[in-house]
Image (spheres, helix red, strand yellow):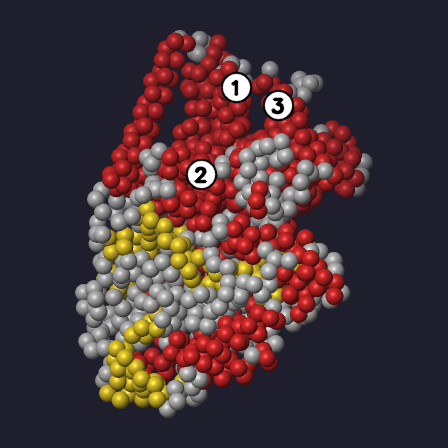
Amino acid sequence: MRNTRPTPAFLVGAAIVALIAATALLSFFFTPFDPLQVNAPARLQGPSLQHWLGTDNLGRDLLSRILVGARITLLVGVVSVGIAVLIGTPVGIWAGMRRGAVEEITMRGADILLAFPALLLAIMFAAIYGASTVSAMAAIGLASVPGFARVARAGTLQVMNAEYVLAARAAAQRPVRIAARHVLPNITGMLLIQCSVTFALAVLAEAALSFLGLGTPPPVPSWGRMLQESQQYWGTFPAMALWPGLAIASAVMGFNLLGDGLRDWLDPKLGRGKA
Amino acid sequence: MQAILTARRGRRGARLAAVLAALLMLAACSAGSTGGAPVNKDKLVVALTGEPVNLDFTTTAGAAIPQAMMANVYEGLVTLDQTGAIRPLLATKWETSNMNKSYTFTLVEGATFSNGAAFEAEDVKFSIERVKSAAWLNGLKSKMDDVQDVVVNSATSVTVNLARPSQAWLYSMTTLVGAMFDPSGVDDLANNPVGTGPYKLASWARGESINLVARPDYWGTAPGIKDVSLRYFADAIATTNALSSGDVDVIYNMQAPELLSSFESNPAYQVLEGTSNGEVILSMNNKAKPFNDKRVRQAVLYAIDRKAVRDTAWNGLGTLVGGPVPPTDPYYEDLNDRYPFDPAKARALLQEAGAQDLKITFTVPTRPYATAVSEIVQSQLRDVGIDAKIASAEFPAVWLDQVFTSHDYQMSVILAVEARDLLTMFDDPNYYIGYDNSKIKDEAAAADASDEANYVEGMKNVVRTIVDDAPVDTLFIFPNISVAKAGISGLGANSVTEALNLAPIAWS
Amino acid sequence: MLVRIAGNLARFVLSLLAATLAVFALMRVLPGDPAAIAAGENATPEVVAGLAKQFGTDRPLPVQYWDWFSGLWRGDFGVSYVTRTDISPLVADKVQVSLILVTLAMALALAIAIPAGTIAAVRHNKPSGAVIAAASQLGIAVPGFLLGIVLVSFFALRLGWLPANGWVAPGVDFAGFLARLVLPVIALAGVQSAILVRYVRSAVLEVMHEDYLRTARAKGLSPLGALVRHGLRNAAIPVLTVTSVQFSALIIGAVVIERVFVIPGLGSMLLSAVGNRDLLTVQSVVMVLVAITLVVNLLVDVLYTIVDPRIRAAAQGER
């Protein structure tokens, strides 16, 4: 029943994500201008041969800032997803394998943590440690832990009843070995889908935080902050808002499509719905 | 079957659309009707940013409280006019004697507090002595340190004796430390202010607005508008949106100069651009490396093109002065030529000081002006070889804690709003700037103790000495920008006091 | 069943307890003495010490926690260090504002998402289904605040149809109240409905392949007819789960929307309290937001127990 070819959604998503990653990488070696170089006489210019996307209120090159901004977007996504995967997955697998009190306690813990959404945690963290990319990533990562724990647990529960796992358990293999050899490989697909969706949420959360002035502080160009800085110029110079807005929307869409595509591709049950 | 289904779905969709449209129409009509209604001349809504946390400036710092309360609810014996000159208020006149050490005030007759109590000389004694007591927790209370005693001569005459002659003391009396209180009205100042002013507090919807109502029993000229609502917004963009859609009548002390253009070209609005007491100061920690070296500080002043900073960060609004004194202060002079923009000279000074390839941290409070300024300053400093790393500090809490209290910073930028704060900033080596005041201490004290003319001359000397040492770079004087509907008159363009004086405002 | 509901309640109480501890522990790591912050720029150490005593922040942390905690059960959040007023009545006031906003937004989001998601599922291989799916994909990708700003620029500033921001109590001016709600509710619901459409669509798709639906269709019912008669009830369960999860997301999303539209709800209160370092208020508002989420979870749990105890596990497996 499994679809053998990736869906168009997957391909489009993967293409967008690859483009963003390439952009971020490129920005380490080359940007048309220094993204931080203020150039007062050249402020608020429209697109030109020199500045392809125009300049912002301080005369900085918008294209260069968008390119470098991709780094922050990826950084926030990768680190927060990383935190969530590294904490959530083992906890979820453990809960699914041990069952009983361990499962009850960890899942209740996840439920409580779920009552602290990323943005709320991030606002609290910003209040405590000040606004920074680090506290934003920590908050988003921590808030995404329950999602991974649940997915990992649900996957583990399914796998644990499979014959090969039962055989391994009968052979008295160590739980860590079972987890690594049998459980993890079988839930990787589900985890990848969750990664992709969480990544999209992280990009949105970072944008909202930067908009509130609680995200990446200046002068580092993050897309969310570029959007926030553009607010005064909506009436007179919408291009300043257009590009970061487009960048955020396409990044979120890219990761969501990637996740959906993965799901359709890997999940036979939903694949049937597509057929 | 398919057709029936489609039809049914179509009907349902149409119904939903109709409901939504009706809602929108309803909303649109009601919005239109409030917008098109004739102006109610008894009402005024003023948009401000930064709501007071409570109404008690005797125990709580922050500019928002006196902005709303002083001149409107509270009054002092004296006040300032729009040019910055001292004028009578609750005192009709005053005389100095004993070589400027004693001030005798003659009080107005018939003034009352909003709780009905009469304003008399005893209240002056009570108010001034209260500043000196433990009841006042605002750090500004030190402005009354020089007061030795207060003597009540009669119900309308009172003498204040100072420990030493002071010109500056009378000026302090125009600020919040000079506010007059009634002994029976100080129980709950945070929520229930009682003063002699033209307005009293009608209600306070926290998170929304402070509503003031004119007092029918006010002793002076009745205010032009009966009901004034001070509505608080999170940012400047929200204030201009509200003005555009007619929800507010005035934006005072507007913080987004880029948004002015649409109002300037529209005859339905007036834009007032005045000056203020606020200096946007690039402060350096004079006690810590690398800015403990005068040459490095001077290099910073040469490296920064203050005109470009103002033009880019604040849309060309604000006054360039070259020293930490606003033009409305009596000892102001134009010092723009002292440190012209000269990157070559900056580099030479840095080399002389052995401070090439400097790496510093630039602690920037989270305020619109600070963020805007910091990115240009950073870029200009980089041109002379100073690599400033911007570290954002939440304002007020983190900035106060880190920079102001702990002095844990190298460079920062702040809008110093307090009036006549020259000596507060520079005549105290323990202030966060850490300026070594040994050169100015005596001259400043002598000036304060002398007569008016010598006071001004002496203070000008003090300013020159300070600017020569370059403890800070005064980037520009913050403009006081107000946008009002065209029919409004009496709104003071300049912000020379800490108050937004509402009483003169009226609809024409 | 009563036992199960009692179990739900007990777990809710335990969660709430754990949440109070977590919130308190987190908030008290704040740098900066609340007293020093309240005292402001020109304070002397004596002034700061006086304030610390007045606030009670000079006492040991467990004592402060107990003080706060015991107040919570009486619905008393204490007196803010900064505003010097009771927090509870303020919170009670702001909660209403936020709940009105969030509930209306959720209702609108569901009103859009359920029909749209169902159509998208039924016609999933026709253009109209694809259009809805694509639109929802786009809707999810737009940050809510961006949608809000666009709505303000267009409907309030350019067309002048609606007020740009603000809030009027319904009792004071009902038309004005509604007018000011339209844009923020649309901004909040827009993104939310895009998310919900996806869940409704996949839940309906799931149900469409169940055997009883095939049977129903074999009996001559149209796809939609069969779905409405037999399928929607089953599709409703995962949607209900998602709705409860999204409700808490919506409450937090409202923080940002309240900022854009200057709505005096819990979000605005939270952000200004963060700015003023009004510790106790931040603590209280966070606690209320968390408690609302936990209450919604409890309600859904109880609902599940009443409908069918076995369903919960199945619905959870879906996520």
Q: CA distance from mark 3 to mark 2?
A: 36 Å
Q: Which residue is mark 3?
A: A9
Classify 10 Å Cα crowding around label 2: few (below 14), some (14-19), many (20 and above): some
* Residue type marked 2: Gly
Chain to which the residue tagged by mark 1 belongs: C
Pick whichever, B426 or A97, lies toward us. B426
Residue furthest to the front in view is B337
- Amino acid at dot 1: Ala
Dot 3 crowding, Cα within 10 Å, few <14, some 14–19, many 20+: some
Q: Vertically, is B16 above or below A153?
A: above
Residue A84 appears in view: no
Q: Which residue is mark 2?
A: A235
**Residue plotted at (50% across, 74% down):** B460
Check the image and report above or below for B212 versus A85.
below
Q: Chain of mark 3?
A: A
Mark 3 and mark 2 on one chain: yes
**Dot 1 alpha-carbon crowd within 10 angstroms: few under 14, some 14 to 19, many 20 or more:** some
Q: Give whichever of discs 3 and 2 has the lower sequence position.
A: 3
| Left or right of residue B38: residue A145 | right
Q: Chain of mark 2?
A: A
Image mark for residue C130? 1
Instruction: Determine whether C121 is above or below B125 in the image.
Output: above
Q: Position of residue B44 (x, y in %)?
A: 27, 53
Q: Which quadrant would the N terminus of chain B be assigned to in this image?
A: top left
Disc 1 and disc 2: Cα gap in Å?
Answer: 34 Å
Asked whether the residues under the numbered discs 3 and 2 touch, taking CB atoms below 8 Å apart as contact, a structural biologist would say no
Quadrant location of residue B361? bottom right
